[in-house]
Amino acid sequence: MHALLDCIAQLTPPTDAGRLFHGRGGRYPGCEHLSLDAYPPVLLLTSFTPLDTASLAAIDQALQQRFAALGQTLNWVYQQRGAGAHNQLMRGTVPQLHTVSEGTARYRVRLLQGQNHGLFFYISAGRAWIRQHIQALREQGHADIKVLNLFAYSCAFSVAALQAGASEVINMDMASSTLALGRENHQLNQLTGAKFFAHDIFSSWGKLKRLGPYDLVIADPPSYQKGSFVATKDYARLVRRLPDLLTAQGHALLCLNAPELSSQFLRDTVEAEAPALQFIQRLANPPAFADVDEERSLKVLVYQQGPAPQ
């Protein structure tokens, strides 16, 4: 746990939300179960194995010392992950309506509820790519840019797309509760042009096709969620639908957050199920999520419909 304590001793709380310590990447032996995130003005410590009282006390003491030296108020939450998630406020307070920023975007988060908090940091490079891609389309003269956001969760991709100049974003997710959070995020950022559908994606291809075609389709599914999506069997079902949803030169942003599956799994799936899609690039993960084995980390692949660019 020394690497985490060293990080705490040197940290300066950021103004934007983000990861501060990524033990899950395997670069800090003995800390593989730990991560520390900033959701200003609150820090969140997550452990994938239970921490004993002495360890929690040592972390609390380190945080108190650092924040006292900085002259700042300490607020922190501990989440123990396992079969479920247990969230505990350790010190300070959490805002009742907790809003964090990522660049120009604002997002509502909920640190004391459930396993996921409303904003996934590991996919921030995907949000940045979406902004750049849509801005580039607009500079090329595209005035009506439609985006389909599958497995939308709290619709952070949609916020990024609309802020960059997309005309319309269709957000679809089975969970109406997370889509409600998505609506809040659009209201926070004073955005219009988003639609929200609490549907099973695999039962909605007809509706999605009628609402299209799309200049960009985004898919960030869970790697294994019984009754919703299992990557090893369901990614093929998803990919084979993409050519019918995309415009002639449309792009797809495909995400795979499964350590046991490599990027080649996803590339092979696309080649087999949608050969009309051409591989463009794999996005680099944020530096804060550096991993000893990039094939175990998040895979984000960009594809384009039609011939590959020369």
Image (tube, rainbow, N blue to C red):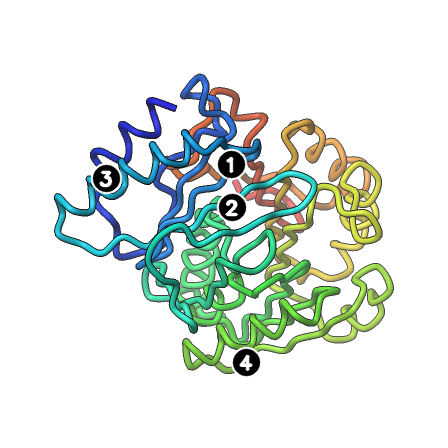
Q: Tell which circle, 4 or 2, labels the residue nearer the N-terminal end.
A: 2
For the residues labelled 1 and 2, say whether their Cβ atoms are less than 8 Å apart.
Answer: yes
Name the residue beneath numbered marker 2: 79
Q: Nearer the viewer, residue 161 or 57?
A: 57
Coordinates of residue 247 in the picture (x, y in percent): 67, 62
Name the residue beneath numbered marker 1: 47
Which mark is in front, 2 or 3? Answer: 2
- Residue at image x 60%, y 56%? 114
Q: CA distance from mark 1 to mark 3?
A: 19 Å
Q: Amino acid at mark 2?
A: Gln
SS for tag 4? Answer: loop
Q: Amino acid at mark 1?
A: Ser
- The answer to whether 53 is drawn above or below residue 220 in the figure is above
Does residue 169 appear left or right of residue 273 in this picture?
A: left
Q: CA distance from mark 2 to mark 3?
A: 20 Å
Q: Which mark is residue 193?
A: 4
Q: Which mark is residue 11?
A: 3
